[in-house]
Image (tube, rainbow, N blue to C red):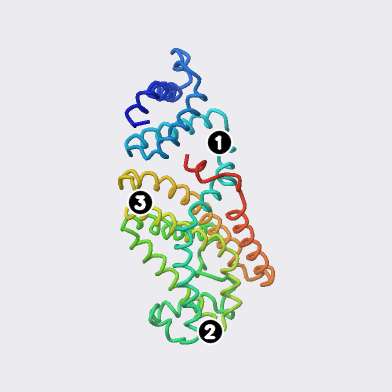
Amino acid sequence: MKQVQFIEHYQTIWSQLQAWLDYLALPRRKRHTQTAPTGQFAELYRQTCHHLALAQARHYSPHLLERLNHLVVAGHQQFYREREPIGSRVWSFLALEFPAQVRAQWRVLSLSAAVFYGSMLLFIFLTQWQPDLVYSVLDPMQIAEMESMYDPQLHDRLGREREADSDFYMFGHYIRNNTSIGFQTFTSGLLFGIGTLFILLFNGIVLGSVAGHLTYIGYNDPFWGFVVGHSAFELTAIVLSGAAGFKLTQALIFPGRKTRLYALRTNGRIAIQLMYGAALLFLMAAFVEAFWSSRVQTPLNVKYAIGGLFWLLVMAWLGWAGRKHTAQQVDV
């Protein structure tokens, strides 16, 4: 069927669905003063989902695909808003839709993880072989500050100096610092990937140099005991932010048969979903870093065990949760 015939044949259904969307968008008290549109909302929504799938399979114009996708997305939001309380929607997103979306975006996720973890591990190794390499990454004042933060003989707290700062203050500080890195990594994807690539490499090299240097001078227990607790949340969130940034880059460089604007809108919705999960992980990392990681009274073996447990939980969540959800369901 040609596109013109397809539109003429199903135009009435799409108009009825749009009328229902306009009606449902009204405040409840205003709805009671108006007559409901014709047709059944659920049936119209189901038919339009089918029409969108047909249009995608037949490679109809981006304009038509965008129109149908808009109807389906708006219908999806209304359909589930009417039936699910907000707590259920949040739980459904975190437990089912988000991990399914992460797995569906494995290409950009793998690229982000390779750049970030690869550069970090490389510099941890290189600083064991060439210790002076750290001075090519950090200046002597920064290195001295790092050594002071993790010197086991000088502090009853690990991490940033905090004589006058409470745990709550540090919680806010870590949230601001973490979300700043994540937001920059994400939005710089609009610079055709160069910005995201640079920020991932920069953070990987700096973290690897610091970790490698402190390990080389024998500060293993204070440093690794501090970072192990929140590393699963923080490092995973950085990788997710990089994947979200590369998703924007993909729309700009490889839009396929879509226009760049349409591809950017489509990929942008997926990238935002990835950033929702990254924001949650950054929040959890800040909480653990402020209230748990800095405590020296906790035995190191307990810290390592808790840190390992967090890594297992994060990997299980992203690897197995919501396995019955497909990428198509999430995209809708």
Mark before the other along the chain sequence, 1 or 2: 1
Q: Please give the residue where the numbered disc 1 appears in the rendered image.
A: 86
- Number of on-image labels: 3
Amino acid type, residue under disc 3 in the picture: Ala
Instruction: In the rendered structure, find residue 276 and report the number of the disc placed on it.
Output: none
Amino acid type, residue under disc 2 in the picture: Tyr
Q: Please give the residue where the numbered disc 3 appears in the rendered image.
A: 251
Residue in the image at 45% along x and 63% along y: 111
Marks 3 and 2, Cα distance to the nearest angstrom?
43 Å
**Vertical order, 188 against 140 (above or below):** above
Residue in the image at 32% along x and 55% along y: 253
**Front residue (pair 101, 201):** 101
Amino acid type, residue under disc 1 in the picture: Ile
Residue 188, percent across and down? 35, 58
Marks 3 and 1, Cα distance to the nearest angstrom?
31 Å
**Vertical order, 34 against 208 (above or below):** above
Marks 1 and 2, Cα distance to the nearest angstrom?
50 Å
Instruction: In the rendered structure, find residue 216 and report the number of the disc placed on it.
Output: 2
Callout 1: SS: helix
Work out which residue is located at the far front of the displayed protein and give it: 1
**Front residue (pair 298, 8):** 8
**Front residue (pair 305, 35):** 35
